[in-house]
Amino acid sequence: MTSPSAANSGRSPADVDLSVAIGALRLRNPIIAASGTFGYGVEFAHLVALDRLGGLVTKGLSLQPIEGAPAPRLCETPSGMLNAVGLQNVGVRAFVEQKLPELRKFDVPVFANVFGYCQEDYVEVIRILEDADGLSGYELNISCPNVKKGGLQFGNDPETAAEITRAARKAALKRPLWVKLSPLVADMGLMARAVAAEGADALTVANTYPAMVVDHRTRKSRLGNMTGGLSGPAIKPITLRLVWEACKAIEIPVLGLGGIETANDVLDYILMGATAVQVGTASFTDPRISERLGAELRNLFFDDKLFNISELRGRFLTEIG
Ligand SMILES: Cc1cc2nc3c(=O)[nH]c(=O)nc-3n(C[C@H](O)[C@H](O)[C@H](O)COP(=O)(O)O)c2cc1C
């Protein structure tokens, strides 16, 4: 049997092209640090070579600052973690004034994660960001309660998700718009098509799974907010299927996000059709993981005799045996 190195003779891992196109954007590699797990990016600059990342997504930004949920906010679970941060953030104006000027010093595509409690909030946050320099795009987090519709999440209903995407698309004149979907959908294909039809440039699949951890001795929740969102390796098989369903349903790029810890996890998502991935919870155990995965991915591709991501993307085989 030929060893991978013999089969690749004359070529080296440096010949692997990890760059990916997401709409008109080209990222140097498919590894993006996920929202809420990488601060506003600037806090990680002393630890991580930001210019080696495919990109980073900021903490969710709202129109007004939000203090967030009461402590405790994080709780470890088997193969994962629960969080209820309550979307704490400095607010979009403080982000533009205080964080963005610092971020502009780094050669990394920055995507602003946007959320609101009604459609007008989303639109206003985007309008404020449109006037600022230094962003590569927006990621709409639609897994938030819609206060006008009695707390129902925007992201659970295809019609509401389409409405908010349409409004955001009209406001986002300068930059690409990604929509981050909730995993709590009855039919991921239907949801993906509804959002893509309104002009989203890419979909991020998916957010955390609503969950609880309680202590029967104290009879209390382990989170101040009572419930939280489950993330980490525990959710990867569930989200992998959602990514597959989304990729089958639409033509626009899908970013896979859920439980990624290794370069093999990244390849799994690419196999299902993802164009790029995001890394969330794993940054808590190793803040440099997104940088490291880029290097590991190059070697893994080379060992598999792959020199371009498109040679693997969506090549999942459905034959049995
Ligand atoms: C502490 C924490 C905060 C998060 N905050 C946000 C947020 O503000 N906006 C958002 O869209 N997703 C947020 N997420 C969800 C992650 O971006 C990601 O979708 C989820 O954790 C699944 O990926 P993972 O298993 O790699 O962590 C947060 C996740 C965690 C763990």
Image (cartoon, helix red, strand yellow):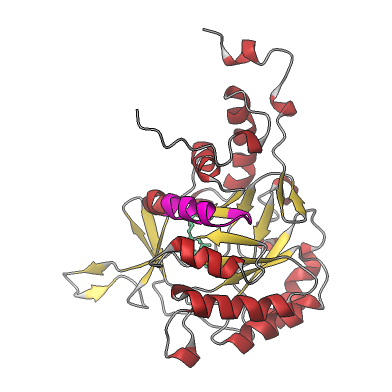
Residue at 75%, 77% in the rendered image: 129
Give residue 113's quadrant in the image. bottom right
Residues drawn in magenta: 239-254
* Residue 146: % across, % down: 49, 85
Please check the rendered image and state whether residue 250 is part of the magenta-colored stretch, yes or no: yes
Q: Is residue 295 visible?
A: no
| Residue 147, position as x, y percentages in the image | 48, 90
* Position of the C terminus by quadrant: top left
Residue at (82, 78) in percent of width and height: 131
In the displayed structure, does residue 136 sit left or right of residue 253? right
* Residue 94 falls in image quadrant: bottom right
Q: Residue furthest left?
A: 217
Q: Residue at x 32, y 77 (%)?
A: 226
The answer to whether residue 13 is left or right of residue 179 is: right
Q: Is 170 covered by the magenta stretch?
A: no
Q: Mark yes or no: residue 192 visible.
A: yes
131 up-or-down from 187: above or below: below
Q: Residue at x 47, y 65 (%)?
A: 190
